[in-house]
Image (tube, rainbow, N blue to C red):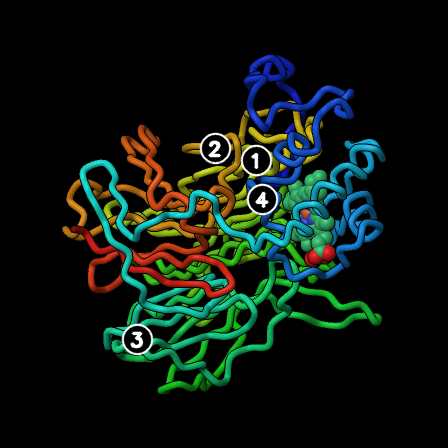
Amino acid sequence: MLKYLTLGAVAATALWLTRPTLPKNQSNAPLAPNAALESPENNYKTYCASCHGEKVEMFVDRQWKHGNKKEDLIKSISKGYTENGMPSWSAALSPKDIEAMADLILATIEKGEVYRFSEKPKSNIFSAEGMTVKLDTVVKGVPCPWGMTFLPDGGMIVTNRDGEVYRVDKNRKKTKLAGVPAVIAEGQGGMLDVELHPKFAENNFIYLSYSIGKTENGEKLSSTAVMRAKLDGNQLTDQKVIFEALPYLKTRHHYGSRLEFDKNGYLFVSVGDRGQHGPKLPQSVENSCGKIHRINDDGSIPADNPFANKGKAVASIYSYGHRNPQGMVMNPTTGDIWEHEHGPRGGDELNRIQKATNYGWPVISYGINYDGSVLTPLTAQDGMQQPNHYWIPSIGPSGMTFITGDKYPAWKGNLLVGSLRFQYLNRCKLENGKVVKEEILLQNIGRLRSVEMGRDGYIYVGVEGKEGYVFRLLPM
Ligand code: HEC
């Protein structure tokens, strides 16, 4: 049997011993079973903050879906909505803890304080190592600016996860594009990434990734798809779905969905494990989930794809064993594709993508389950690639770019990664493929969803919020 088709025996007992012990004071440290002794504030930090934000106040601004009466909260917390990515907490927390958590959320809401960052930046000027930058507001009113790309005419395209795609002209006038695909805007799904064809100036091709839906036996299922279309003014034409991840599933999270062309003109598409992290999906090459795919610009399969013509294997797969990759970029110096992916609790990863390689999820991971229990005792195994870098606690990475050009001399060649959870931009200095230094930029700016280099040589960031912004970083 082909080596990459096997799961690999859970052989190396010795590796059990090599798992690093997490420092006790970290939010990732598993709690003792007597968690009932913890205050609801501490339980919130340990169990909830990674997804709902560091402050309980995040709930004040929530568009409630399942109700915010005490009994609704208790039900939401106990049972969870596992198909939408909200775990059930009845095993990890006692009924008393859950009730105390509901009271804490209620008290926070009742205080009526509209959610605000207590340390929200007071100015739009940020100083960092070797550089000071000023925020320049380019776009406003895109609540979840998931993807962005830049047009040769000085304008840009921004997606909003709710389902819209905007063309922003060079005078910053924003117009909704017609002819975009229908999306399943639920959970983490919706209108996701956007990319231009490398020869856009000649062919006007634009690519959108999104959550596609279909109904089967009365059940609404969803998956990750890519549409190619022509951009004609404010209209898309010649729409064609060129990629569809299989199978369609009931869940509404872990779509992955970043798009990136490499310098050979191949289109890379990331697809998450769809929250089905039994080893079956990400570790088997007979489905599309938990994979990085490589396709031609029309959706056909490059002849030298590693799994092309390999029996039941999905021919578009380039690498596998991924969890939820929401950042992908070509390294402009080496031409390699880099991706990052969300870990569970802890263990977000940065990887350089290599052909036919298994990145190990969920057999190896530096993270643990959301409830603090052990997900896998293994952090390494033969035949499974180690990450170039990992984050504990999870930063909740989204969006990624290498700093090119000469506008940011002190940061040249650095990698930028957005943090949803901690609401900043993470600057990584790389040496020989390893992150040797990190710095927090734009602290408390908001959930940082996307980051790109513009054609004008400036860094652009997309920040979530009621308003939602795209900012440009002007060096001062
Ligand atoms: C792994 C990410 C994750 C973690 C950890 C998590 N949640 Fe959630 N939570 C979600 C998601 C996603 C939803 C939205 C579910 C949906 O759309 O149906 C949600 C929904 C909720 C809701 C319902 C909100 C509504 O709109 O009605 C409550 C209440 C809630 N979470 C509380 C908590 C508490 C308390 C904790 C910690 C004990 C927690 N969550 C931990 C992801 C998470």
What is the CA distance from the residue labelled 1 to the residue labelled 4? 9 Å
For the residues labelled 1 and 3, the Cα–Cα distance comes to: 43 Å
Q: Is residue 188 left or right of residue 471?
A: right
Amino acid marked by disc 3: Arg
x and y, in percent, of residue 129 in the image: 23, 36
Which residue lies under the disc numbered 3? 172
Q: Viewer-nearest of labels 1 and 2?
A: 2
Q: Which mark is residue 323?
A: 4
Tell me the residue at 73%/44% (across/down): 87
Q: Position of residue 140 (x, y in %)?
A: 40, 69
Binning the other alpha carbons within 10 Å of mark 3 as few (below 14), some (14 to 19) or many (20 upward) gives some
Q: Are marks 1 and 4 in contact (CB under 8 Å)?
A: no
To which quarter of the image does residue 61 belong? bottom right
Circle 1 residue: 360
Left or right of 276 in this view: 285: left
Query: Which of pointers 3 and 2 lies earlier in the amino acid sequence?
Result: 3
Closest to the camera, between mark 4 and mark 2, is 2
Question: Could you say whether the residue bearing mark 3 is in a helix, strand or loop?
Answer: loop
- Residue 49: x and y in percent read 60, 40
Amino acid type, mark 4: Arg
Which element is circle 2 on?
strand
Which residue type does callout 2 highlight?
A: Trp
> What amino acid is found at the position of numbered circle 1 in the picture?
Gly
Q: Which element is circle 1 on?
A: loop
- Marks 1,3: beta carbons within 8 A: no
> Which callout, 4 or 3, points at the residue further toward the start of the chain?
3
Between the C-alphas of marks 4 and 3, the distance is 36 Å
Q: Nearer the viewer, residue 33 or 193?
A: 33
Dot 1 or dot 2, earlier in sequence: 1
Crowd tier of the residue under label 2, counting other residues whose Cα lies within 10 Å: few below 14, some 14–19, many 20 or above? some
Q: Nearer the viewer, mark 4 or mark 3?
A: 3
Question: Could you tell me how many numbered marks the image carries?
Answer: 4
